[in-house]
Amino acid sequence: MKKYIYNLFMVLLATAAMISCTDDEGTEPGNDTNPNIVLYQYKASRPNNPDNDIVLRFAANSKTTEAYYLVEKTADKDAHINSMGKDAYMDYVVSNGIKVNDISGASNADVIVTDLYGEYTITAVAVGKDSKASAETTFSGLSWTDVVTGTYYFFNAEKLGISPSSPTVLQVCTTDANLYRFKDVFGAGYHLKINLIDYKGSDEGGEYQFFRVPVTDTPYVYGNYGTVNVRDIGYFQNNDAFVTEGGYESGMYSNYNCFIYVQYYVSAGNLGYDYDEFIAD
């Protein structure tokens, strides 16, 4: 009986070990059976344009011998999938895409893709000995239409050591009617975006619509404290009510004149907050 129990125990132990090995395949380093790739997307930093450029990171496993990627308009990619199927589309990416340098075995590689305007899908394909695998990510590149020219006035120009005003163009995003920007208002490539929200007010200038000012970097440097950034008071206080109820709102009139209540700051702290202003021509 003892011998029988011992033999049964050894059989169960061997079975458990086999199951454990099977579960670990593809999850533990060196146990992958097929190629695989993971695609990450990051915001492009300057001097790139985050509106239309992105950073892609390709992460391949040990069974990947090479990898390719293809950047296509999302509508074109969907049409290809519908016409040829997913497997054939992976072959299409390999044949028509760009090979990712520095991918071989378990490895990572970063690529910057620029000048994307509209809806795009980026597809990556990992190639192994006998099979392929794919991953994808999407990106919406912003396009803009001019609304009106005008002049932007900075409340703390003296502290920043800049001109008190800047000629600019108010533009609206072609894919989002609530998204505007003051083009190049801080310098070439440095725009100030504003997002209209569903709040309205009125004063002696007439009715206006509230908007938010997200965190925005500028080319300005303040002393030894580094880059100057700007944002509205709601983002400053991490509380939307400061903008919608607290009297620190920013607004756009029907003639596109704007008052913009913002804070200028560096990593070390506050540089002041008050009204900037845009006057349309």
Image (cartoon, grey):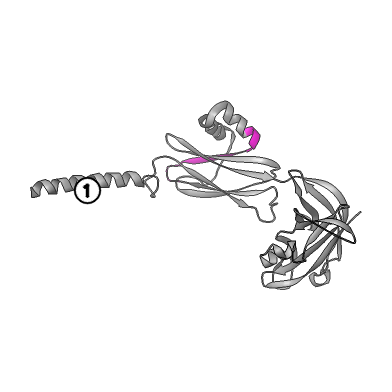
Q: Quadrant of residue 182?
A: bottom right
Nearer to us in this view, 58 or 258: 258
Q: In the picture provided, is 104 more to the left or to the right than 213?
A: left
Name the residue rendered at 81%, 49% in the picture: 171
Residue 158 on image: x %, y %: 83, 71
Q: In the picture provided, is 44 more to the left or to the right than 39?
A: right
Name the residue rendered at 56%, 34% in the picture: 93
Q: In the picture provided, is 166 more to the left or to the right than 33?
A: right
Q: Please, what secondary structure does the residue beneath circle 1 have?
A: helix
Name the residue rendered at 69%, 62% in the picture: 240
**Membership of 63 in magenta stretch:** yes
Inspect this view and state whether residue 229 appears: no
Say which quadrant the C terminus sits in: bottom right
Q: Quadrant of residue 161?
A: bottom right
Residue 101 on image: x %, y %: 54, 45
Q: In the picture provided, is 47 more to the left or to the right than 97?
A: right
Inspect this view and state whether residue 103 appears: yes
Residue 16 on image: x %, y %: 26, 47
Is residue 199 shown above or below 71? below
| Residue where numbered disc 1 is placed | 13
Q: Please, what is the three-letter code of the amino acid marked with disc 1?
A: Leu
Q: Which residues are magenta?
A: 61-76
Name the residue rendered at 54%, 29% in the picture: 85
